[in-house]
């Protein structure tokens, strides 16, 4: 006999169908990861671009592995606290970190940072590339670089910009831009994107510089206005925003990245297991779409491929840092 389904039961069944995970759970399968809660360290406050991306990736990772995946915000010192913690974490495969190049470059600018990226942390996979964004406060009535330069000439006492990571390219890109247009800009450090966006929205600071992942959502909401980015060609997420190359300053182009790292001496099988799971999540079309909307152009790698890339980038970045006369701090 067929049992009639009531209205309430039907609604519950529909809701359950809508709540189907993005990916099938593999709780019963062997993932190669520890059968324990997994932790992803994030070196910036909750709500910033790095945190939002990490949480976006963590949910399908939880569904795939059947493990509880925790985001642990270790904010401060432009992300270096989290990487320092990763360096000292156990190599049992339970802890990794989601790290931007803005944090790694500080090894060149602040030798006292508590890690050497070539030795003290182990790459798992590249997550994607990201451009640096230069934005202005909506309160100053500026729409592009030309208008911003004219505004600076009329308001010389406000020739400063907030940076989400002092001693990184969210700092240097702003300095380089000011130098290129002939108006020196003073960097003001912030503890992440959230407080900088608040000050930009309120008009407490005229401009800001950081990863486009930190600003794109706020740009679309009208809280800040991104007037150019650091790429050669526009980012996939915002093709309407001009790049510094398109504006006539190709020497200023800088491309950053986000990477998953493990503690040093993590066994290769655990690195491989993490890489397999993370790449599977990053290949999910809906996850890719959301990451692109945040400003990340998704791209993965092997550990060896990323090590080669990081080596080359650190060499180029040192040349850039030397060219603007920046002296290592501390």
Image (cartoon, helix red, strand yellow):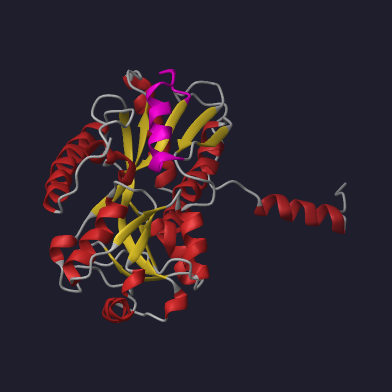
Q: Position of residue 318 (x, y in %)?
A: 15, 44
Most extreme residue toward the front, as rendered? 157
Using the rendered image of the protein, determine whether residue 210 is visible from the camera's viewpoint: yes
Q: Is residue 215 left or right of residue 306?
A: right
- What range of the chain is rendered magenta? 76-94
Q: Is residue 303 left or right of residue 45?
A: left
In this picture, is 264 found above or below 317? above
Q: Position of residue 313 (x, y in %)?
A: 18, 44
In this picture, is 120 found above or below 149? above
Q: Nearer the viewer, residue 138 or 99?
A: 138
Let me know if residue 7 is in the magenta part.
no
In this picture, is 234 found above or below 36? below
Residue at image coords 43%, 33%: 82
Q: The C terminus appears in which quarter of the rendering?
A: top left
Residue at image coords 30%, 76%: 152
Q: Nearer the viewer, residue 321 or 187?
A: 187
Q: Position of residue 78 (x, y in %)?
A: 39, 43
Quadrant in which residue 135 is drawn: bottom left
Q: Nearer the viewer, residue 134 or 233?
A: 134
The total number of labels drawn is 0
Q: Position of residue 119 (x, y in %)?
A: 25, 24
């Amino acid at each position: 006999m067929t049992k009639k389904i009531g209205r309430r039961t039907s609604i519950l069944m529909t809701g359950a169908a809508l709540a189907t995970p993005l990916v099938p759970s593999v709780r019963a399968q062997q993932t190669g990861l520890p059968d324990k809660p997994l932790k992803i360290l994030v070196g910036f406050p909750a709500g910033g671009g790095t945190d939002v991306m990490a949480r976006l990736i963590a949910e399908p990772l939880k569904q795939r592995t059947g493990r509880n995946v925790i985001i642990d915000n270790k904010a401060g010192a432009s992300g270096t606290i989290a990487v320092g913690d990763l360096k000292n974490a156990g190599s049992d495969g339970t802890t990794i970190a989601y790290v931007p190049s803005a944090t790694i470059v500080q090894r060149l600018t602040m030798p006292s940072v508590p890690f050497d990226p070539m030795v003290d942390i182990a790459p798992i996979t590249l997550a994607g590339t990201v451009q640096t964004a230069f934005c202005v406060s909506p309160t100053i009535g500026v729409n592009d670089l030309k208008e911003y330069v004219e505004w600076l000439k009329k308001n010389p006492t406000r020739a400063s910009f907030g940076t989400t990571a002092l001693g990184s390219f969210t700092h240097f890109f702003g300095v380089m831009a000011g130098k290129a247009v002939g108006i020196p800009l003073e960097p003001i450090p912030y503890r992440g994107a959230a407080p900088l966006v608040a000050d930009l929205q309120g008009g407490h600071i005229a401009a800001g510089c950081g990863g486009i992942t930190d600003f794109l959502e706020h740009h679309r909401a009208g809280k800040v206005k991104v007037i150019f980015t650091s790429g050669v060609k526009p980012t996939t997420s915002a093709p309407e925003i001009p790049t510094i190359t398109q504006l006539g300053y190709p020497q200023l182009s800088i491309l950053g990245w986000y990477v998953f790292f493990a503690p040093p001496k993590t066994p290769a099988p655990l690195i491989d297991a993490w890489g397999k799971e993370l790449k599977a999540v990053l290949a999910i079309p809906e996850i890719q779409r959301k990451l692109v909307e945040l400003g990340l152009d998704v791209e993965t790698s092997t550990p060896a491929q990323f090590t080669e890339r990081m080596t080359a980038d650190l060499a180029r970045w040192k040349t850039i840092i030397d060219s603007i006369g920046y002296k290592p701090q501390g």
